[in-house]
Amino acid sequence: MTELLTSAQMRAIEADAIATGHVSGLEMMEAAGSGVVAAILAWRDGRDGPLSLHGKLPRFFGQTVETGASAVVLCGPGNNGGDGFVIGRLLHRAGWAVEVFLLGDPEALRGDARTNYEHWLEIGDVRPLSDCTSDRWIKQTLVVDALFGTGLTRHLPDVVENVLMATANCPRVAVDVPSGLCADRGVVLSERSLPAAHLTVTFHRPKLGHLLADGPTQCGALAVADIGLAARGIAPFKHDQVVSEAVPSDLRKQQGHKYSHGHALVLSGGVGRGGAARLAARAALRVGAGAVTIGCPPAAMIENAAQLNAIMLQAVGDVGALDAILDDSRINALCVGPGFGLSEDRADKLHALLKSGRAAVIDADALTLLSKDADLRGALHGKCVLTPHAGEFARLFPDLADAMDSTPDRNKTEIVRMAAADVGCVVVFKGADTVIADPTGTCCVNASAYHRAAPWLATAGSGDVLAGLIAGLMARGVTPWDAAQTGAWLHTESAVSFGPGLIAEDLPEELPNVLQNIAS
Ligand SMILES: NC(=O)C1=CN([C@@H]2O[C@H](COP(=O)(O)OP(=O)(O)OC[C@H]3O[C@@H](n4cnc5c(N)ncnc54)[C@H](OP(=O)(O)O)[C@@H]3O)[C@@H](O)[C@H]2O)[C@@H](O)CC1
Ligand SMILES: Nc1ncnc2c1ncn2[C@@H]1O[C@H](COP(=O)(O)OP(=O)(O)O)[C@@H](O)[C@H]1O
Ligand SMILES: [K+]
């Protein structure tokens, strides 16, 4: 499991390591610069780096070992700039032609950054960043972006934006985070569309901003270098302060008959609206629920029967009929929302489902019903999993959605934690950066990014499949929290495994490959 840190947490870990004499700031800065240079050299030479790399690097254009190499290092006023001076020195030692530019007054540099600035002055000069004009840039020059890292507090100054724009055609490595990217929220603090890095090398652990929102696009590929903190992990943070990357549960099956693997009930909408529920049901069955039943209005029986084989079908007329089905104690997980409809009768059925107290995925139309009805919302319980996309999230939690957009220090993980605490159950806020939280503050991110990028998942019906996966896992007895993170993880893995051209129907069919791979 990889933990994702905020800037403040990274600073606290560094400060603690320094205070306890584990490592000095200067040693960390040297290790940081050296990690970046190792990654650059590996990239240039087209070999695997010493660092685990997330994502694919484009060919390092224009440079070869024989012809030598040139770099321009852009340094900022803080410790990110300090890393830049180390990188300049180490690239120079490796035979590169290096030019260094600095934002701001050299006399204002402090601490370890100042020390490394002075070391660099023994090698070469430092010119003001404003001296970097676009005619200086040639395609063969590597740009090292060491302007701002985790200390970025506000929008970029014009001079920085201009230089970043002028480097658009150069190979570019970002130190810790691409300058302008907020390391906590993954948003770019600039009105301009800044060119992305090809490679970002961060330290100790990825930061939230590397995975949320625009982070992956801006970072290119992501490498993580140790700076002497490996043994210290993420102490001293408690579980409700830590965010991790989603990981799957152990999905091996024990022996047993079909009902010992659970029975999921998926409620469908009326005639011509059953496709979404059928997708969810198929996913629930593929992920290993022993049995799956679709409950649909009587008029939709023929349509559904014509399309289903392994999935069972029951007519659900009114709420009484639904209650009768729920009398079957073998039904242990519910999925409601995909194609469900918004009529009063649907709200009554949703209420009956919630009242049954069973594990339940609440998706799509069922989320809209919840957002309109305080009684329904009040019936949510700890075995529910809500799976909103951004629009549904904003309808359910308008204040939190506003805070995420307008409050600079609120990132998606904090918002989803607050949402989960508010409704008292697991919330899965979907997107390329799906964030999952439970009411106790446990939180993870399932990022479809870097080596797991799957933009083709943004296709009609893919959310219905996710709802079915989570319901199927809960039918198997997986807890709501584990089902949510495992479902999201499997959803991405199935999309990555299938590749471009994917439509929602392909996801359940790809699942056996994914399950067999993780079992082997
Ligand atoms: N700590 C350690 O031991 C280690 C740290 N490491 C490295 O340090 C980085 C963090 O360093 P950092 O905290 O100094 O922050 P950094 O990103 O350099 O920026 C701060 C400076 O920028 C300024 N500033 C901010 N926004 C601005 C804006 N929009 N426009 C203009 N100015 C702006 C801000 O000024 P102020 O806001 O105070 O006015 C301040 O001067 C981290 O990412 C990693 O690379 C590694 O070496 C490992 C060991
Ligand atoms: N760019 C993307 N990359 C990866 N996954 C994505 C991307 N955009 C959306 N998704 C995922 O696709 C699913 C879309 O769900 P949803 O918005 O409910 O669509 P639908 O209602 O059509 O099923 C979610 O699981 C979401 O996490
Ligand atoms: K940077």
Image (tube, rainbow, N blue to C red):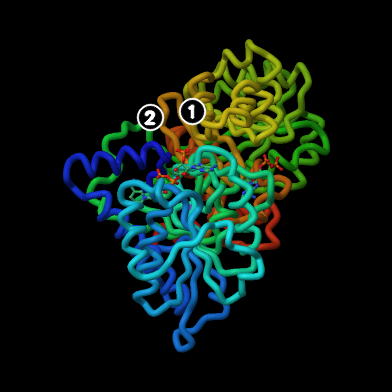
Q: Amino acid at mark 1?
A: Arg
User: Which of the pair 126/409 is nearer the observer?
Assistant: 126
In the picture, the disc for residue 432 is none
- Residue at 48 percent across and 79 percent down: it is 69
Question: Does the CB distance between marks 2 and 1 fall below 8 Å?
Answer: yes
The residue that mark 2 highlights is: 240
Compared with 371, 30 (above or below) is: below
Q: Residue furthest top?
A: 375
Q: Secondary structure at mark 1?
A: helix
**Hey, which quadrant is residue 189 in on the image?**
top right
Label 2 vs 1, first from the N-terminus = 2
User: How far from the left and from the top, in percent, is residue 409?
Assistant: 51, 31
In the rendered view, would you say 297 is above or below 134? above
Q: Is the residue 210 above or below the residue 36 in the image?
A: above
Q: Residue at x 71, y 29 (%)?
A: 365
Question: Residue 205: in sight, yes or no?
Answer: yes
Quarter of the displayed picture in which ligand 2 can be seen: top right
Q: Residue at x 23, y 49 (%)?
A: 24
The residue lying furthest to the bottom in this view is 66
Where in the figure is residue 514, as x and y percent of width and height?
A: 50, 58
Find residue 223 and report its horizontal and vertical position in percent. 43, 60
Q: Amino acid at mark 2?
A: Asp
Which residue position holds label 1? 417
Q: Is mark 2 within 8 Å of ligand 2?
A: no
At label 1, counting other C-alpha atoms closer than 10 Å, the crowd grade (few under 14, some 14-19, many 20 or more) is: many
> Could you tell me how far apart the alpha carbons at marks 2 and 1 are, in whole angstroms?
9 Å
Which is more toward the observer, 14 or 402?
14
Closer-to-camera residue (481/42):
42
Q: Residue at x 68, y 51 (%)?
A: 193
